[in-house]
Image (spheres, grey):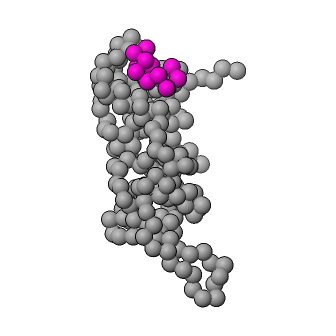
Amino acid sequence: MNARSILDIVQMSIAVPRGEAGYWSIILDLDLGGPWTVREICDRTNVKTQAVGRYVRKLRLAGIAQVVEKKTAKRGLDNVPQTVVYRLVKRPLVAPRISLAGEIYEKNIDRLWRAIKMAKVFSGAEMAALCPDVPPRSVEAYLYALSTAGVLSGTPKRYRLARNVGMQAPKVLATKAVYDPNSKTVIGIPVATEVKS
């Protein structure tokens, strides 16, 4: 039996849109054609209606999507819920991060990535000072992962942005690989460390 490489598994899971970024790409595509429903999003991914519905509700609370029509159930089908039809009011390029209350927020790596691109040359300590809401150990770990992947060059005392891979922050996956959502590729060689017992 042949084992699949981590890269193969990552690429396979990327093919089926999942998570909020996946739902968002589907919503953008559907909205170009007109109104859309939660069911249409679910038809394009293998996720339960409840998860997609939760994200669409957050979009509506944030003022990004709005209800344009409520289709009532046919007679005799009282237990069938009505279909709600939506349109986008705003079209951010990147999937918005929204709390359950509908408040838009930014992830720590997004803050770090924006600061890295603005600073150009920096130390780990300077980056931690520029992003006081991000724990210093998280800053250190993210910079190390980007450096290992070749996105940053230099040393912890003087990093430099070597590869500006795009607007979205590269993601460090559980395999300690750096994923670039802009080109949908893994950058560099995944880093594995020995677990101490």
Which one is nearer the viewer's eye here, 148 or 52?
Answer: 52
Q: Main secondary structure of the magenta part?
A: helix
Q: Residue at x 35, y 55 (%)?
A: 90
Residue that lies at the very extreme toward the right in this rendered image: 197
Which one is nearer the viewer's eye here, 135 or 47?
Answer: 135
- The C terminus is located in which quarter? top right
- Residue 134 among those drawn in magenta: yes
Q: Residue at x 60, y 88 (%)?
A: 75
Viewer can see residue 87 = yes
Q: Residue at x 52, y 58 (%)?
A: 57
- Residue 83 among those drawn in magenta: no
Left or right of 115 on screen, residue 81: right
Viewer can see residue 13 = no
Residue that lies at the very extreme toward the top in this rendered image: 157
Residue 152 vertical placement versus 107 (above, below)? above
Which one is nearer the viewer's eye here, 58 or 150?
Answer: 58
The part of the chain drawn in magenta is 124-136
Residue that lies at the very extreme toward the bottom in this rendered image: 75
Q: Measuring from the top left, give residue 100's x and y in whole percent.
A: 56, 49
Q: Measuring from the top left, give residue 2's x and y in whole percent.
A: 56, 47
Q: Measuring from the top left, give residue 106's x and y in whole percent.
A: 45, 38
Residue 180 sits in quarter: top left
Total marks in image:
0
Left or right of 116 on screen, residue 86: right
Q: Residue at x 34, y 49 (%)?
A: 93
